[in-house]
Image: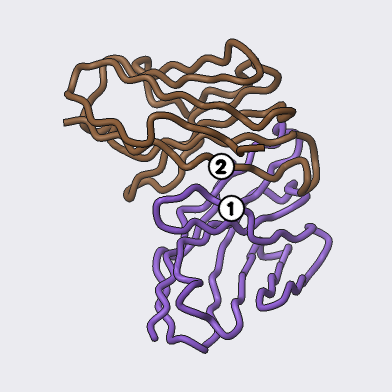
Amino acid sequence: DAGVIQSPRHEVTEMGQEVTLRCKPISGHDYLFWYRQTMMRGLELLIYFNNNVPIDDSGMPEDRFSAKMPNASFSTLKIQPSEPRDSAVYFCASSKGGVGPTNEKLFFGSGTQLSVL
Amino acid sequence: GEDVEQSLFLSVREGDSSVINCTYTDSSSTYLYWYKQEPGAGLQLLTYIFSNMDMKQDQRLTVLLNKKDKHLSLRIADTQTGDSAIYFCAESPYNQGGKLIFGQGTELSVKP
């Protein structure tokens, strides 16, 4: 398996533009997570899905952020409109789910470095 | 609530031992984890410990768990320059569907 695949690797956009980040989880993984990493706040969980259904979106900063998982092999995180304070590295991760290190082990993508000017 | 705290920076000399500390709040976590992030990459699982254990050793890595104080530590023996990275501890709250709560990460700098 190729692992968790994220695109784009880097995104530079202007304030007010719409940004869409994409993620392909590992085949067979039932859980998908979106994290945001900044120097100030560290690694924050934004939202996660189980079997394509959003379970906990309490980490989504505000209504400008939305995430979807239309099928088991694809998820998007959208920011509209984007602001400079959204600049961060956004990681997607997947896991089998369930208790125990084998099931809980997260596999991370390489991240999308977002810069909003 | 769920919260994981770590110190932000640690600097050691090559060959010394490194000890990275972490405190967590959720006593329901069955497993606790250490992840490693190298520059420009995502996090990778380094090791883990079952909550009923006090210690786990894995080659150069030793994990110590004080469940009473909710304190977790990672010791790296004979630290090498290749160990320079950010280390995250994580708890897995019970019945949260596999959600991991990460600390802020400790940046380990190994000087030759």
Q: Image height check: is A95 above or below A83?
A: below
* Mark 2 lies on residue: A108
Residue at position x 63%, y 34% from top? A94
**On-image quarter of the N terminus of chain A:** top right
Q: Do the residues labelled 1 and 2 touch (CB within 8 Å)?
A: yes
Residue A38 percent location from the top left of the image = 35, 45
What colour is chain A? brown
Q: Image height check: is A23 above or below B37?
A: above
Q: Mark 1 lies on which chain?
A: B
Q: Label 1 sits on what residue type?
A: Gln
Residue at position x 63%, y 13% from top? A71
Q: Label 2 sits on what residue type?
A: Phe
Residue at position x 51%, y 61% from top? B87
Q: Which colour scheme is used?
A: by chain
Helix, strand or loop status at disc 1: strand
Residue B90 percent location from the top left of the image = 61, 52
Residue at position x 82%, y 65% from top? B53
Q: How crowded is mark 2: few (under 14 residues within 10 Å), some or many (20 or more)?
A: many
Residue B95 percent location from the top left of the image = 75, 34
